Image (cartoon, rainbow, N blue to C red):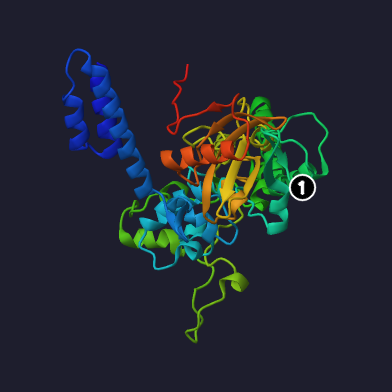
Amino acid sequence: MHLRRLRTAATALVGGSLAVAASCRAHTAGSSNEADRNDAIVQLQRQADKARRKAQERVRLGTQEVLGMTPKLWLEALDEEHRYGSFLYHYWQRWEASRTRWMFFDWLDHGRGSLIDLPACPRRLLEEGKTIYMSREQLKLCEVQIHEGRLIWCADGEPVTLPSPVGLPETPRAHAISDLVEGRLATTRRRERLLSEARVEVVNALHQGKPATPEALIAVTAPLIAEGLLRPLRDPYFHERGNPGATIQDETSYQLMWEQFKVHSLWRPDGKRINRHQEGPAYELPSAVLPGLGWADVLEALEHEEGGGMKDGPLPTADMRLRPNKPGKGGIFAIDQFGTMHAGQKVSGAFHHSSLTCGHCCRFAGNLTVQDGRVLKITPHSGHYVPTEAEYEALLESWRRDGLDLSGAEIAGLVKERKTRS
């Protein structure tokens, strides 16, 4: 049974490598079994590292190679607003399936893509999830060094504690970082409040049997529409837009689905291209809600804005992003191309590994749990960067050589353990 699992893992990992399969079949009974199993595991690890190297962008730096951002997350660095790459990628896939001649960001912000709001990644999430790319001066607040076996902040000499503790007085350094993050969460907090208030009003209207008159609907939805939300209530083709093909009747109707919301052309009468930053979007939804809607439609639109159609369920609130309800989660670090270490508290949609690198290459990126400067746990996991086993071992060896005390630290493996939900 154990050998069959090894074969299955090998096939899934490297596309059914014949060499690994042959190695697994070569197992024999008796004392040679353990050695054969170890050989198979070593070979699997080599194949896994090879697959990682092929999948990961790598940058030549002198005689060394360093890690570039995961290819699909390049979008984040290329975006002027640095919207979180994982969110952008959903819309990139929709753009790829379209037949537009517009470049991606023009399409997304000013073209037909500006009308699309995907249930799997609500437009609200895309607009709010803007990763902080720190300046050189700001990065000094996150710089960490090893001192007497512990990690300390270079800015003030205080010992590092990650994830950030709750309830303790903030140092000036920590307060400056909090101000940066809170600035990015301001829109999220405002929209959360408006969505909560709208839901209460709709639920009360349903309980009281209040009719959904146009005036009543406007009173409830107007603040959210002013924020650019509630597209399902304003777009008769809301569900069709997420599909790449002609989903309504014929090609003429499909084109009409877009053209009736066109505000202006991309080109001037003299043949010159319009400055999209000055003229605004070429396509735009009306601010008025559709006729014949009821309270149930409003609730459905609120559900969409709250992430009800996402794979992992509703969106986490701003407070949940700041303080994830998972012990030991949130501490991140990156070693830049010059060997300098930066660390901080991950905040989904605002502060990521790319915040510590400004989207540039790095030697390593992972997660840390640190208490009063003492390292308690290290994991080599990052959505933006994907290191190999050799690079992980080199990092640990470098830290030990520099005097970092890892005697009490849990050194997590390269492969994440998937915990089954109860």
Residue neighbourhood size for the residue with mark 1, other residues' Cα within 10 Å, grouped as few (<14), some (14–19), many (≥20): some
Q: Nearer the viewer, residue 43 or 344?
A: 43
Is residue 65 positioned above or below 347 on the image? below
Label 1 residue SS:
loop
Residue 37 point in image, percent of width and height: 27, 23
Q: Nearer the viewer, residue 83 or 150?
A: 150
Residue 169 located left or right of residue 127? right
Residue at the farthest top position: 30
Residue 169 located left or right of residue 28? right
Residue at the farthest bottom position: 270
Q: Nearer the viewer, residue 36 or 57?
A: 36
Residue 238 point in image, percent of width and height: 47, 49
Name which quarter of the figure residue 82 lies in.
bottom right
Name which quarter of the figure residue 168 lies in.
top right
Residue 147 point in image, percent of width and height: 71, 39
Residue designated by label 1? 155
Is residue 138 positioned above or below 40 on the image? below
Q: Is residue 205 visible?
A: no
Residue 55 point in image, percent of width and height: 37, 48
Q: Nearer the viewer, residue 139 or 327?
A: 139
- Looking at the picture, which amino acid does disc 1 mark? Ala
Is residue 206 positioned above or below 230 on the image? above
